[in-house]
Amino acid sequence: MQDIARHLAGRLRDLRQARGWSLDRTAAATGVSKAMLGQVERGESSPTVATLWKLASGFGVSFSSLFAPPGGGAGPMTAGATRWGRDAAGMQARVLFPYDPVLGFEMFEIELAPRAESASAPHAPGVVEHIVVLEGELGLTLAGEGDHAAEERRLAPGEGLRFRADCHHRMRNLGAAPLRFHDVIHYLGGGG
């Protein structure tokens, strides 16, 4: 987990420097506070998945690129090579396949602790998620018209749903055991 925090610290610093952005400019672009950005860059904080999504969207990069080794490297990729530790919301992500610019997608295995929930701000325009539940029961709420939340949809093992992720959405583990699901994220307008 410390290695991931150190890696994220360097990755965030690299993204900022490549764009010539100050912490103030980065906070404005990502919606993440300047204080939190500073903590992440110093390796003092392990951000939630929701915070990481804000960073990825603000920088215009794919989620998995935040975990990519320096230089990115193309070529064959072993599934499951990167695991991100459990965040404060009880979510843990494992990169199964990192972002592929030719195919425009990345794939994760997500685990959500018993009764935990994770709320996400809208991802970048054109991002579509495909979720398939492996174990447990998932409650998924998508923002409705006029910022009114739609009813929570329940997904059991083997069930899936595709949705536009450029709206607020919330995932809840409805059970007393860990929830596991695959999440394929497709960037219709590019990502990376």
Image: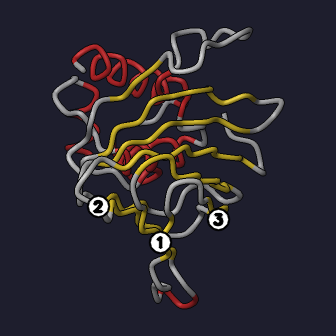
Residue 46: image location, x then y, percent = 24, 33
Q: Depth check: 4 or 78 in front?
A: 78
Asked whether, in this view, residue 174 is left or right of residue 125, the answer is left
Identified by mark 3, the residue type is Phe
- Find disc 2 in the rendering and name its residue: 175
Ranked by sequence position, the earlier of labels 1 and 2 is: 1
Q: Nearer the viewer, mark 3 or mark 1?
A: 1
Ranked by sequence position, the earlier of labels 3 and 1 is: 1
Instruction: Identify which residue is drawn at 56% across, 27% down.
Output: 96
Identified by mark 1, the residue type is Arg
Image quarter (top left, top right, bottom left or bottom right) of the C terminus = top right
Instruction: Identify which residue is drawn at 28% across, 27% down.
Output: 41
Residue 10: image location, x then y, percent = 37, 18
Q: Depth check: 37 or 130 in front?
A: 130
Determine the secondary structure under disc 1: strand
Marks 1/2: CA–CA distance: 11 Å
Query: Please, which colouring scheme is shown?
Result: secondary structure
Identified by mark 2, the residue type is Gly
- Find disc 1 in the rendering and name its residue: 154
Of all residues, the one furthest to the right in this rendering is 102
Q: Nearer the viewer, mark 3 or mark 2?
A: 2
Residue 139: image location, x then y, percent = 42, 68
- Find disc 3 in the rendering and name its residue: 163
Determine the secondary structure under disc 3: strand
Marks 3/2: CA–CA distance: 23 Å
